[in-house]
Image (spheres, rainbow, N blue to C red):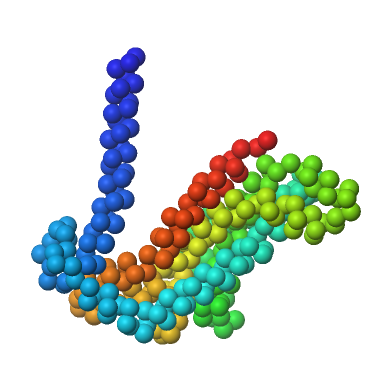
Amino acid sequence: MVEGRKQNNVLTYILLVLGIMLIILPLYVTFVTAFKSDAQSSKSFFTLPIPIYLESFKEVLTNERYWKAFINTVYITAIVLAGNIIIMPSMSYAVARKMPTSMGYRLVYYFLLLGIFIPFQVKMMPLVKLLSALNMMNPTGLAILCISSSTCESVFLFVGYMGAIPPDMEEAAWIDGAGTLRTYSSVVFPLLKPMLATVLIKQGLWIWNDFMLPLITLNRGWQDWTLTLFQYNFQTEYSINYSLTFATFVASMLPLLIFYCFMQKSIIGGLTSGAVKS
């Protein structure tokens, strides 16, 4: 019995080490290559950058197109996150509280759940035609599309989380004379902060790193590029400058990586709180 447990522990640690290597190795190659010249990168991807080469970062950070792509990415991400803050919790509150007694709200909830299981490839061409017909093939149009695309998953998470919030506090607010809007804004919304942080970080990571939606909607001119499109187009027709490409990766991922490191406790807190019902 003891030997069997030891074997299971060894197998678990082996799998964990392999998983860690799958994460660390690409990050190591990315950061190391970013500080190499193209000649150093052509010799070996895995050696340390000796000497450290910073000209790639200088070329990227002085490129007008990089900063335009950075501003577009921040703009789209900010609009999507603002939409998630304003729309998703209020919509979920109505669904969560009315669903037990109303067939209509249950149907709305299940209809939204179906959207989670529809592959993006199925929706891709209709979405492009719709945006084109509405003249919304621009960063603002993409932001609105991303808000609508995040509705299904966000509502699912918020409704599950609100199931753990006892309605007694809302009833106390109603007895004190508060209406539905006041009860939601003063009682319910502050309790949603852990799940709100989870949703915002999750959606922020998706929007910041998304490639497919910007590719099919914004790849008409560099003025509308996001950072992922800037990376995609940062190459010549016949070759790739690996040092510049990986420097672009690092410059694009650092802001979100730093933000994620500060907010990771909120992600874990939101997921675990939503998973347990009182």
Tell me the quarter of the picture where residue 169 sits. top right
Residue name at image x 45 percent, y 81 percent: 224
Instruction: Give the number of callouts.
Output: 0
One can see residue 106 in this view: no
Q: Nearer the viewer, residue 178 or 127?
A: 178
Q: Is residue 184 left or right of residue 26?
A: right
One can see residue 269 in this view: yes
Provide residue 29's location: percent of width, then percent of height.
23, 59
Residue name at image x 37 percent, y 69 percent: 252
Q: Quadrant of the N terminus?
A: top left
Residue name at image x 25 percent, y 52 percent: 25
Tell me the quarter of the picture where residue 278 sits. top right
Considering only vertical position in the picture, is 227 above or below 195? Answer: below
The residue at the far top in this view is: 1
Provide residue 79's location: percent of width, then percent of height.
57, 71
Q: Is residue 205 left or right of residue 63?
A: right
Q: Is residue 238 left or right of residue 166?
A: left
Residue name at image x 64 percent, y 46 percent: 160
Tell me the quarter of the picture where residue 197 sits. bottom right
Considering only vertical position in the picture, is 163 above or below 65? Answer: above
Provide residue 261's location: percent of width, then percent of height.
43, 55
Provide residue 43's location: percent of width, then percent of height.
10, 64
Considering only vertical position in the picture, is 99 above or below 4? Answer: below
Considering only vertical position in the picture, is 79 above or below 257? Answer: below
